[in-house]
Image: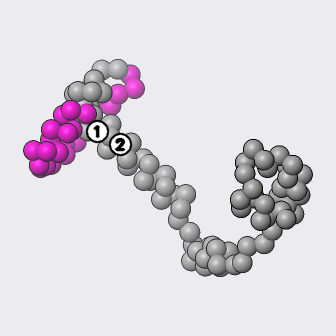
Amino acid sequence: MAPNQKAKSERLNLRLSPESDGLIRQGATLSGQDVTSFMVSAALDRARSLIIEDALVRLSPVDARDLIQAIDREASPVPQLVELLRRTKDDRSSMGSGALSALVD
C-alpha cells in the first residue's frame, strides 16, 4: 500500500437504472478508471464542491437581510466608471453606439 493511502474499510451499496449503469461505465472507460474509482472520484469531487459552496454562501440572518436590502437599492453611478466611459467615448466606434452611448451622453 502506498504511504498516503489508508485502508479502505467502508462500503456503499446502491441501485441504479440500466441507463445510469451504462452511462457510468462509459464514463469510467473514457477516463481510464475502473467503475469504483470513477464513482468514488466523482462523488468526492461533488461532495467537496458542495461543502465549499455551503461554507462560502452561508449567511447569518443579519447578513442575508443586508444583502437583500443592497440588491433592492437603486443603483447609483460609480464616478470612476463614468469617467472611464467618458475618456473612451472616442473609441466607441469599434463597439457600436448602443447602450454605451446612453450611459455617457
Tell me the quarter of the picture where residue 11 sits: top left
Around disc 2, counting alpha carbons within 10 Å, would you say few (fewer than 14), some (14 to 19), or many (20 or more)?
A: few
Task: Tell me which amino acid carries mark 2.
Answer: Leu
At 73% from the left and 73% from the top, the residue drawn is 75
- Which colour style is shown? one colour
In the figure, is residue 1 to the left or right of 14?
Answer: right
The CA distance from mark 1 to mark 2 is 6 Å
Residue 6 part of the magenta-drawn span:
yes
Task: Classify mark 1: helix, strand or loop.
Answer: helix
At 71% from the left and 59% from the top, the residue drawn is 98
Task: Tell me which amino acid carries mark 1.
Answer: Val
Query: Does the residue at mark 1 contact the one at mark 2 (Cβ under 8 Å)?
Result: yes
- In the image, residue 66 sits, relative to residue 8, either above or below, namely below
**Which quarter of the figure is the C terminus placed in?**
bottom right
- In the image, residue 35 sits, relative to residue 71, either above or below, namely above
In the figure, is residue 55 to the left or right of 17?
Answer: right
Give the magenta part as a residue range.
3-27
At 42% from the left and 47% from the top, the residue drawn is 48
x and y percentages locating residue 29 in the rendered image: 23, 27
Q: Is residue 84 visible?
A: no
Residue named by callout 1: 40
x and y percentages locating residue 13 in the rendered image: 15, 46
Q: Nearer the viewer, residue 82 or 19?
A: 82
x and y percentages locating residue 70 in the rendered image: 67, 74
Which residue is farthest top? 2
Q: Can residue 31 be seen in this view?
A: yes
What's the mark number on residue 44? 2
In the figure, is residue 58 to the left or right of 22?
Answer: right
